[in-house]
Image: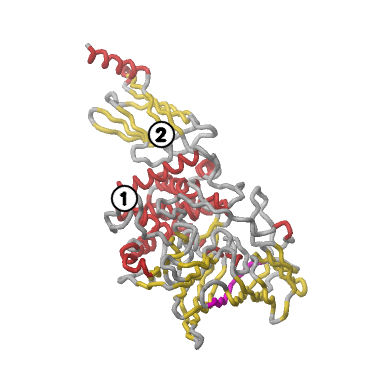
Amino acid sequence: MNTDQSISLKAFRVQSVRCVVALAILLCSVPLVAAARRERVIDSWKPVNYNVSLTFNDKLTEITHARAEISVLLLKEKVSEIDLDFGELEIDSVTIADRTARYHRAPGALRVILSKPMPRGTRFVIVVSYHGKPKDGLILANDKAGMASAIGDNWPNRLHHWIPCLDHPSAKATVSFTVTAPTENTVVANGQLTKVETAANASRTWTYNEAVPIPPYCMIVAVGDFAELQPSQTKITPLVYYVPQPDKKFAMQGFAPANPSLEFFSETIAPYPYEKLALIIGATRFGGMENSSAIVFSSTLFDPRPVAEPMSKTFNVRSGIVSLVAHEIAHQWFGDSVTESTWSDLWLSEGFATYFAGLFIQREEGEEAFQEYMKNAADKYFSYERKIHTPIHDSDTEDLFKLLNPNNYEKGAWVLHMLRSELGDKDFFSGVRRYYTEHRNATATTDDLRLAFEKVSGQDLREFFRRWIYGAGHPQYDLSWEWVGKEKKVKLVLKQTQTGAGFPNSLPLEIVMPSGKRRITLKPTGKQTIQELKLDEAPSAVSLDPENTILKEARVMPTPNRLKATSRTRAAHAI
C-alpha cells in the first residue's frame, strides 16, 4: 500500500478509525497475542473459502441483498462457536447445513453457536444473509465524473464492515464474488472472471473466482462506469486498466510502468502469483491499495499537480507515478502472496514494496535516480525518527494506521538495501527467492526472512536483525584518522555515538592518496573500533561509506595533527 494521495510516497491523510472488534467478550476460540497490542491469531478455527454474493440497488447506494458462505475448518477439539468479525449491517439469517443457527451480536462481532461441540478437522459452511449500507470498507460514492461507484477499501481490518470474516491478515482464504449491478456498470473483483449474465431487469451478474488464498484486507469488488483499456504485448498476465471516463485518454500513458514492472518482478522474484492484474482508479483513502490482482489507485492519480514534480525520462510521466505503480505491483508478491503473520511484521510488506519499487527505478531510470530515491527514503526516515523512536518490529502501537510510517516503509527498504550490501547480490536475491518460495500463498515472520538469508549465505544474521528490526534508531558515526609518518601507517578511530548498542554493519571506507584510492572495510566490534593500516604514502582524505550502502548519520573528524597542518597552511596563505 502507498499512503500518499499526492504520490510522494507517504503523506498519509489520517482518518480516525474506531475499534471494530470487542475482543473482551470473545471466548477462548481465538486467543490473543500476549503483547501490548492484542491481535487475533488463527487457533481454534480458520476460514478456508468465502463465497460472497452481492446485489446492489440501481444507484449503487446500498446492498439490497448479500449472502456470505464461509467455509470453516476447525483446528481444536470441542469447538462450540465461531467468532466472526462483522459490522452493523442488518442480518436476515444465519444457517449451517440449511438449518438455522443461533448467534449473538456485539460491536464488531458475530458469534455463531454450533449445535454441539465439534472435533478438530471438522469442515462446514456458515451462511450469513444480510443487507444495508456499510459504514466502512465498501465505499459507495460518486467517482470523479459524478457517476455512482462501489469500491472495496479494507486495510487494515475493515472487510468485516461488509463481509463477515476473520479480519486479520494471517487469516488468508480463497474467495469468489458474484455481483449483481445495473447493466451500465462494469464489475471487477479478485481473481478470474468466469461468467457474466444479463437479466431482464436491467442488471448484470458478474462472477469472479480467486483460487489462491489472499489476506482479507485484499478481498474487494469495484463497481462503476469504467472505461476499460488493455495494453498490447503483455507477456506475464492479462493486464487491464479500469478508470473513470475523464481518465480514459491518459490511462495508457499513465500506467506505462505497469507492464515493465510486472516483467521485472517476475524475473527477479518468481512468476506472477495471480490470474490477472486489474489497475483501477477509484475511491480509496490511500494513494494506492494493493488488493490481490485488483489494485485500486486514488481518483487523483493522474490529476495535474499545483507544483511541478520531477518527470520520468523513461516513461514520460511524473516520477511519483512510476514509484507508486511499481510499489503496488511489488505488493502482489510481498504482502499479498507472502503476507505478514502479525502487524509487527508489516515491514515485510511495506519495506519490500518500497525497496523493490526502488530496484525497478534502478533498472529503468538508472543508478543516479535510484540513489536519489534511497536518499529521499533516508531523509523521510530521519525526520520521523527525530520525533518517534520506536523499532520496526512494533508490538505496542494500538492504532494500526500509525504503523503506516517511515519505519515500515523507508527504513524497511533500507534494511533490505543493507542486507544486499552485506550479502552481495547473488546471496541477497537468492535469499529473497527462497523466502518467497517457502511462504508463497501463506504468511511469514521476520525470523522467516532472516532464516532464508542465513541458509543461502551461511552467515549468522541474528545480531543484524536484533539491532535493525527489533531495536530502534540508526548508527551515528564519528570517524577520525591520523597519519603516523614515522611508521607509515594511518590510524582510524570509528565511534558510534547514538544511544543504545552499536550496529554490526561492515563499514566501507575509501582512502584517497596521491597515487590513487584504496577501499577497505571496517568491522565494528563495539561502539568504538580502532584499526591501523600500513600505507606507502600519506592519505589526503578518508571518506566513509562512499557508495551510500548504510542508513546512517556520519562525520569524518579531523585529527589534531591535521588541524595544525590546516592552520599552518592558512597562515602561509595569509602571509
Nearer-the-camera pick, 250 or 315? 250
Q: Residue at x 49, y 52 (%)?
A: 13
Q: x, y (%) of residue 244?
A: 40, 68
Mark 2 or mark 1: which is in front? 1
Disc 1 is placed on an element classified as loop
Q: Which residue is mark 1?
A: 310
Amino acid on which the number 2 mark rests in the picture: Leu
Q: Is residue 85 above or below residue 414?
A: below
Q: x, y (%) of residue 79?
A: 73, 68
Q: Quadrant of residue 571?
A: top left
Q: x, y (%) of residue 147?
A: 44, 70
Q: Quadrant of residue 15?
A: bottom right
Q: Left of 160 or right of it: where is 224?
A: left
Nearer-the-camera pick, 218 or 262? 218
Q: Residue at x 76, y 71 (%)?
A: 117
Disc 2 + disc 1, Cβ < 8 Å: no
Q: x, y (%) of residue 205?
A: 50, 81
**Which residues lie in the magenta part?**
45-57
One can see residue 431 in this view: no
Q: Is residue 323 magenta?
A: no
Nearer-the-camera pick, 66 or 499? 66
Magenta: main secondary structure equals: strand
Amino acid on which the number 1 mark rests in the picture: Pro
Mark 1 surroundings within 10 Å by alpha-carbon count, few (fewer than 14), some (14 through 19), many (20 or more): few
Nearer-the-camera pick, 389 or 130? 130
| Quadrant in which the C terminus is drawn | top left
Q: Which mark is residue 522?
A: 2
Disc 2 is placed on an element classified as strand
Q: Is residue 562 above or below residue 72?
A: above
